[in-house]
Amino acid sequence: MKHFSCGDIVPGCGITFTAADEDGILTQVTAHATADHGLTEVPPALIEQVRARITLS
């Protein structure tokens, strides 16, 4: 399983994500970024930051 913590990029955000693969994490992160952080689109640079911080759990 893969794991990502939003707080690794957005200080103070306690949301974490777990999925079988990177695509599953990115799907969840995109939904969270739009719903909870007000982004209308997720910039490629942010996607790369997320990818760099995805770990195995």
Image: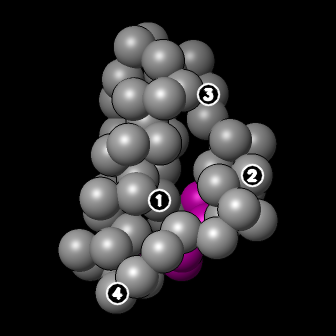
Can see residue 1?
A: yes
Which residue in the structure is indicated by mark 2? 48
Residue type at mark 4? Gly
First in sequence: mark 2 vs mark 3: 2
Q: Is residue 35 above or below residue 24?
A: below
Find out whether residue 9 is within the magenta segment: yes
Which residue in the structure is indicated by mark 4? 38
Q: Residues within 10 Å of mark 4 (few under 14, many from 20)?
A: few
| Residue for point 64% across, 70% down | 43
Q: Position of residue 16 (x, y in %)?
A: 35, 47
Q: Which mark is residue 55?
A: 3
Q: Which residues are magenta?
A: 8-13
Q: Are marks 3 and 1 in contact (CB under 8 Å)?
A: no
Q: Is residue 53 above or below residue 14?
A: above
Residue type at mark 2? Glu
Marks 3 and 4 sit apart, C-alpha to C-alpha, by 25 Å
First in sequence: mark 3 vs mark 4: 4
Residue type at mark 3? Thr
Q: Residues within 10 Å of mark 2 (few under 14, many from 20)?
A: few
Q: Residues within 10 Å of mark 3 (few under 14, many from 20)?
A: few
> How many labels were placed on the picture?
4
Marks 2 and 4 sit apart, C-alpha to C-alpha, by 19 Å
Q: Which quadrant of the figure has residue 49? A: bottom right
Marks 1 and 4 sit apart, C-alpha to C-alpha, by 14 Å
Q: Residues within 10 Å of mark 1 (few under 14, many from 20)?
A: some
First in sequence: mark 2 vs mark 4: 4
Local SS, label 2? helix
Image quarter (top left, top right, bottom left or bottom right) of the N terminus: top left
Residue type at mark 1? Cys
| Between 45 and 11, the one nearer to me in the picture | 45
First in sequence: mark 2 vs mark 1: 1
Which residue in the structure is indicated by mark 1? 6
